[in-house]
Amino acid sequence: MSYGTLSLTLVFVLIPLLLSKTLHLQLEKDVLIATVRSIIQLLAVGYFLKFIFESDHLVYILFMVALMIGVATGNARKKGSKIKGITWKIALTLTAIEILVQSILLGFHIVPPTAQYIIPISGMAIGNSMVLSILFLNRFQAEADAHRDQTELILTLGGTPRQAIHTQLTRAIKASMIPTIESQKTIGLVQLPGMMSGQIIAGADPVQAVQFQLLILFILLTTAAISSILLGFLSYPSLFNERMQLLKEKE
Amino acid sequence: MNSIEPSAIHFKHIEYETGEQHILRNITGSISAGKITALVGPSGAGKTTLLRLCNGLISPTAGEIFIDQTPIASIDPISLRRRAGMALQSAPMLNGTVFENLALPRQLQNRSLDKKEAIKLLDDVGLKPENLKKSIRELSGGQRQRVSLARTLVNRPSILLLDEITSALDPSSIKEVETLIKRLNEKDQTTIIWITHNLEQAVRMGHYAWVMAEGKLIEAGESSLLKNPNEEITKRFIKGELV
Ligand SMILES: Nc1ncnc2c1ncn2[C@@H]1O[C@H](COP(=O)(O)OP(=O)(O)OP(=O)(O)O)[C@@H](O)[C@H]1O
Ligand SMILES: [Mg+2]
């Protein structure tokens, strides 16, 4: 695609702008910001990746992965600002996911150890883990706040913090994993996954594209399970103090 | 209050403040071991807060509490809460059956409650065995309060902290619960703090009474003091001028 053709695609931006204007949705500013940001960010990433793929140097790969974890952590931590030490807990979760995924992929020689594979797969694993972390934290805080009386009841009867928060914790873990599992049930029927579509458009063999997509789907399942469970077990203790008292809700 | 009697709970210059509110102010006093102390006072006086301090659900912001002469801060929170059982007016329940709720204190210790024990517990609070299989949702407010009390008794606490546990009961159930509490107190020497808004109940059930208002302990003595108080605030409270 040439930049000339690409600029024609801006028609797709004009449509929501015009609709927003006529219907007074007041979304013009956000649409423009989103457009400009996506152009700049993606182009920068494109050129940067090109550079990294060509050099294929471990330091660049590590830098790129660290950057992804950093940005994803920054994004997810806003949702868990009530939980003490949430930043490092999310960072630890994302790092654990990345290490696990890459050790399986590279350890079993499922993909070659090159930047071309490591970076996009890391991006998907970390990105998914970030979304899962946000879903989990939202739900966990809502559950914990809504059922404070149950938590205190169990503490009152001589239960541990872990026992007192167990129901809310598992409910939040389950709820945050459901979208990943559900979307995989209808995948290919309702929507073609983005990566696969991209590969097919770029001219890859559809069957090979499917194989890679399956790999990614299974990775996403693992990241979904591990992120919410790991983050859950890292974050619930901060709802209590060392005297096993349920801390006050904070704003 | 008889100063020779051993104290089960001793409060020493207790303050409790949250960020915005000063809830308890300089509470000093002893709860006699093996006796029933009625705790009365207008709404918002800090009665529930004082109970929550006794089983370590919260800690004082200043001052010290002693349970059987041991500083509360040095008692393991779990054993403290099993020793000082609390039952609440709101009678919070887990979803499920009456039996599951009764078994909960055991389940938390990876132990089970057998059916016989459960039936005995229900009987103690005046509920029939067939209630065991009932879902919590099918219970009336008064039945819930009694299940909640029975559940508190599963841990065989030596201190009982009761927070308006008869507020939703009819007169005959109130009588049953009062008889049960009296029996626990006489038979097992259970120390009891009983928050109630019913002053007749306080006089009838309490060996002693504590009157609280605005976060302070106004006066303490034999429960008959409620009929003949010394303090102006208590007089106004009893006349119904403070709510
Ligand atoms: N967790 C809390 N956070 C903030 N304020 C609280 C909290 N718990 C209680 N309070 C405040 O502390 C004061 C005393 O409350 P407490 O529940 O101890 O009173 P009480 O004597 O039990 O009243 P009632 O007879 O209505 O049950 C009240 O002003 C209440 O608003
Ligand atoms: Mg109260």
Image: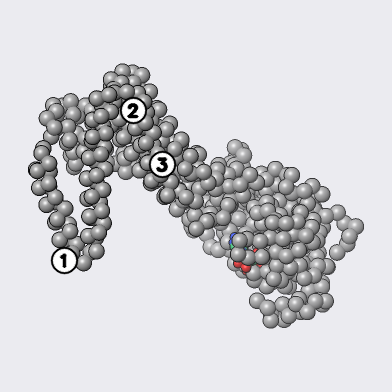
Image quadrant assignment for residue B52 = bottom right
- Residue lying at the far right in this picture: please name it: B4
Q: Amino acid at mark 2?
A: Ile
Q: Is residue B23 visible?
A: yes
Q: Quadrant of the N terminus of chain B?
A: bottom right
Q: CA distance from mark 2 to mark 1?
A: 46 Å
Q: CA distance from mark 3 to mark 1?
A: 38 Å
Q: Position of residue B10 (x, y in %)?
A: 79, 56
Kind of element beneath mark 3: helix
Q: Name the front one of labels 3 and 2.
A: 2
**Residue at numbered disc 3:** A73
Write down the chain letter for disc 2: A
Q: Nearer the viewer, residue B63 or A183?
A: B63
Q: Is residue B205 visible?
A: no
Q: Amino acid at mark 3?
A: Thr
- The answer to which of marks 3 and 1 sits earlier in the sequence is 1
**Residue at numbered disc 1:** A22
Q: Name the front one of labels 2 and 1.
A: 2
Few, some or many residues within 10 Å of mark 2 (<14, 14–19, 20+): many
Q: What residue sits 58% from the left and 61% below the top?
A: B90
Image quadrant assignment for residue A5 = top left
Write down the chain letter for disc 3: A
Same chain for the residues under marks 2 and 1 in the image:
yes
**Residue at numbered disc 2:** A61
Q: Which mark is residue A245?
A: none
Q: What residue sits 16% from the left and 53% below the top?
A: A13
Q: Position of residue B172 (x, y in %)?
A: 65, 67
Q: Position of residue B173 (x, y in %)?
A: 64, 64
Few, some or many residues within 10 Å of mark 3 (<14, 14–19, 20+): many
